[in-house]
Image (tube, helix red, strand yellow):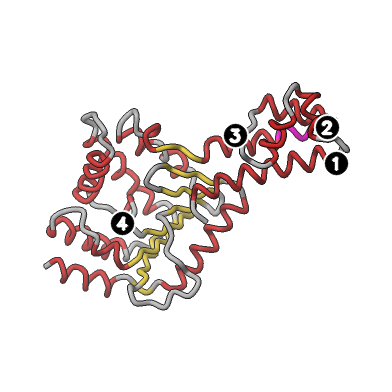
Amino acid sequence: MPPSDSVQRARRDLGARLRSLRNSQGLTGEALGAACGWSSSKVSRIETGFSGINATGIKAWTAACGQPEAAQELIAVAEGIEHMYLEWREMERAGLAKAQEHVIPLWGDTDRFKAYAIDYIPGPLQTEDYTRAVLEGIRTRRRLSGDDLNQAVRTRAAKQRYLKKAIFRIVMEEDVLYTRYAEPAVMRDQLARLIQLADYPKVSLGIIPRNVDRGSAHKAQDFWVFDDKTVQVEIISAFLTLTQAHEVRHYIDDFQRLNELAVPSVPLILDAIAAYS
């Protein structure tokens, strides 16, 4: 499921819960709308996920249904949806460094990480030169201003401290090793770094070969899973955060299928280093 579809589905799921609450009280859409001071069309748009609903609206809805105690949980769901889809331009408006800092609190609270990579070598595995090349490319492509590139590189490099504190299972497509974001010497150093990290006791790194029979394990966007409770997905236009259990489960299941295709990383990394030579 594409990330943008995940947001829409979350809205529809919330709307379905609100509709179920209305139906349980025998209220029509017109009657609920009248009680809340809305049109019946607004009620319909909320229930079908085409319009969002804020905390005030949820309180009015649950009060009209005679179940104000249901508001707190539904408000939490609505707020989660509101923060689920964070456009890159909003996150990077304060600069690349602030965008890198955005995820630090979640990293600090996580004990078990899962990551899948199809585009970039995952952040905490990157050398500073590779990170610099990647972030410079992002800044150029998105026409970002500011002189905080060095700070952004340092912020991403700081994630490496978690490699000795938490447990990581990282799966990468073999093509990631050959996707050149920097000059060959930088790429060779980066791949050598991966071999070093493969020996870390808490880091497990697997590579999915190019010629593998994929079956149902289709390629996906780069994503991270945090303690099997939160998923973050980077797409071209946005940064997606998922916390609803059924959405998180979708990515956990995808990761499991992809993980089953992965093989020990060192032989494939050595082949890639030779190619850069």
Image vertical order of residue 156 relative to residue 258, above or below? above
Judge from the rendering whether residue 28 lies leftward or rightward of residue 129; answer left or right: right
Residue occupying image coordinates x 71% and y 37%: 44
* Residue to which mark 2 is pinned: 65
Tell me the element at label 3. Answer: helix
Q: Is residue 141 left or right of residue 9?
A: left
4 or 3: tag closer to the N-terminus: 3
Residue pointed to by mark 1: 24
Residue for badge 4: 121
Spatial distance from mark 1 to mark 2, Cα to Cα? 8 Å
Q: Name the residue located 25 percent from the left edge and 42 percent from the top edge.
A: 141
What amino acid type is highlighted by mark number 2? Cys
Amino acid, disc 1: Ser
User: Measured along the vertical axis of the image, is residue 108 above or below residue 127?
Assistant: above
Which amino acid, mark 3?
Answer: Glu
Instruction: Estimate the x, y position of residue 16 in percent, counting from the top left.
Output: 72, 44
Question: Magenta stretch?
Answer: 65-72
Is disc 4 placed on a helix, strand or loop? Answer: loop
Q: Name the amino acid, label 4.
A: Ile
In the rendering, which numbered label is found on residue 79? 3
